[in-house]
Image (cartoon, helix red, strand yellow):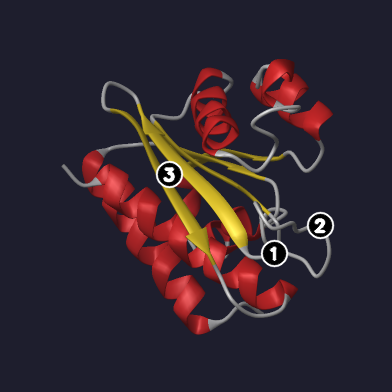
Amino acid sequence: MLPTDLIDAAEAALTACRVAGLKAATAESCTGGLVAAALTAVAGSSDVIERGFVTYSNEAKQEMLGVPAGLFPVPGAVSEAVARAMAEGALAHSHAHVAVAITGIAGPGGGSAEKPVGLVHFACSRNGAGTVHRREVFAGDRDAVRMQAARTALAMLGAAATP
């Protein structure tokens, strides 16, 4: 159902978390649960995956993850600040040790000169290790942007689990 390389990336992230003894959570907006789907497509993932949040609306980001409402007007839902708040909120609202968050503009509409279609902000937070941010602008259609975003998020999750 999912591309082999996405499942391979999920397996690598799960292995890194397993070796480190970490439970993981996801907080997804533009990927709509694709990262959690890839992780849970791997047999035995239940020993690592604690939960996943699909927070497509700003209200969901606020209610489920505690993202401050003041971030939405400026800098906006697709921003470093919101990605960081999503990752940190996923940790605060779960029993996970590490969380990855994604917020972006998958297209085909919704972009602007400042925030083009394909812009995705990622954050990965680990208890005791802080939060790492990454910004990417992916090319392609909606599906391509979402797949590239999921691959990036899985790589960040695996990297966060590795000492």
Secondary-structure class at tag 3 = loop
Position of residue 47 relative to residue 151, above or below, is above
Q: In which quarter of the image is residue 112?
A: bottom right
- The numbered mark, 2 or 1, whose residue comes first in the sequence reads 2
Decide if residue 76 is on the left or right side of residue 153: right
In the rendered image, the quadrant that contains the N terminus is bottom right
Q: Quadrant of residue 56?
A: top right
Q: Can residue 42 be seen in this view?
A: no
Check whether the beta carbons of the residues at disc 2 and disc 1 lie within 8 A of each other: yes
- Mark 2 lies on residue: 110
- Mark 1 lies on residue: 117
Q: Which of 83 and 3 is in front in this view?
A: 83
- The numbered mark, 2 or 3, whose residue comes first in the sequence reads 3
Give how far apart the Cα atoms at labels 2 and 3 are.
34 Å
Label 3, residues with CA under 10 Å away: few <14, some 14-19, many ≥20: many
Q: Residue at x 71, y 78 (%)?
A: 141
Q: Residue at x 59, y 20 (%)?
A: 93
- Mark 3 lies on residue: 48
Q: Which residue is drawn at 56% across and 23% down?
A: 89
